Amino acid sequence: MGETQGHGHQEGHGHAQGSKYGMVIDLDKCTGCGACMVACMAENNVPTKPDETNKLDTITWMRVFKLSNGKAFPEAETCYLPRPCMHCGGKHDAGHSPCVSVCPATATDYSYKTGIVSQIYTRCFGCRYCMGACPYKARYFNWWDPKFPADMKEYLSPDVSVRMRGIVEKCSFCFHRYQRAMDRAFYEGRELEEHEYQTACTQACPAGAITFGDLNNERHMVHKVVNDKHEGHAVLQGRKPFRLLEELDTNPKVYYLSARDWVVKAGNASLRETKPATKKPSDGHH
């Protein structure tokens, strides 16, 4: 999927002329229903097995995690956290994503035109270096040949390649939708509108917890929310957007919102409370 840029990125290239598509997920709205997971699998031809209980070899591009504050009733609280691919830009948005930097086959690459990390299935030979490098565990290996019930074969999307056994796959921000929308906009001689390119999970969320768009476009809601502007200020309601594991400098494009401090700390190790160092008892010697 997507166009390739090669691994010869230079520091500071950035997105001065391109788009940078990303998400804002409101964790205070998410109910953990899993509609985003189902929509993602249906849209992107993600295969399933009769027994999905073994999470070591199941494939879910969008996965919803259940978080707890670790307290007993009545102080117990729960939060659901959807986790797609973060489409990391790397330090200074130079395109040095953890997965892109380690792939020996250039089967995954970073696009400065869209800010999306692509996965080129025909180049992947299954070394799984990218899986080990991804701190968000957003990549999945195909341990089996995909099988779909006979009645579902005509249901599969013709816009997305079905992946073979032995390669890695991940969330693509429904890049095929971007390609389709861009073709239409180019044919009509105009710019791409915000509503024309939306991911399947964004449209399927019944709580409206997911907002998707171009982080570089001032007219898009994601830009307004992340930069606390006008309508975005009303969405924030005093909350500050945060990203998972920001201390790693991976520069992900998925932002989260929550008014609960323990949720924000759960996503960032640097914000968690650490126990003060204890001094060793003196033995009387100096």
Image: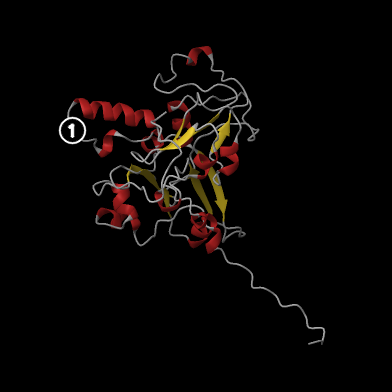
Residue depicted at 50% across the width and 31% down the height: 107
Kindly identify which residue carries mark 1.
190
216 horizontally vs 83: left or right: left
Label 1 sits on what residue type? Answer: Arg
Q: Quadrant of residue 109?
A: top left
Q: Position of residue 90 (x, y in %)?
A: 45, 49
In the image: residue 155, left or right of residue 18? right
Which residue is nearer to you in this view: 233 or 4? 4
| Vertical side of 171 occupied by 25: above or below | below
Is 109 above or below relative to 220?
above
From the image, which quarter does the N terminus lie in? top left
> In this picture, is 50 found above or below 84?
above
Question: Which secondary structure lies at badge 1?
Answer: loop
| x and y, in percent, of residue 182 in the image | 27, 30
Extreme-left residue of the structure: 189
Is 203 positioned to the left or the right of 133 in the image?
left
Quadrant hosting residue 228? bottom left
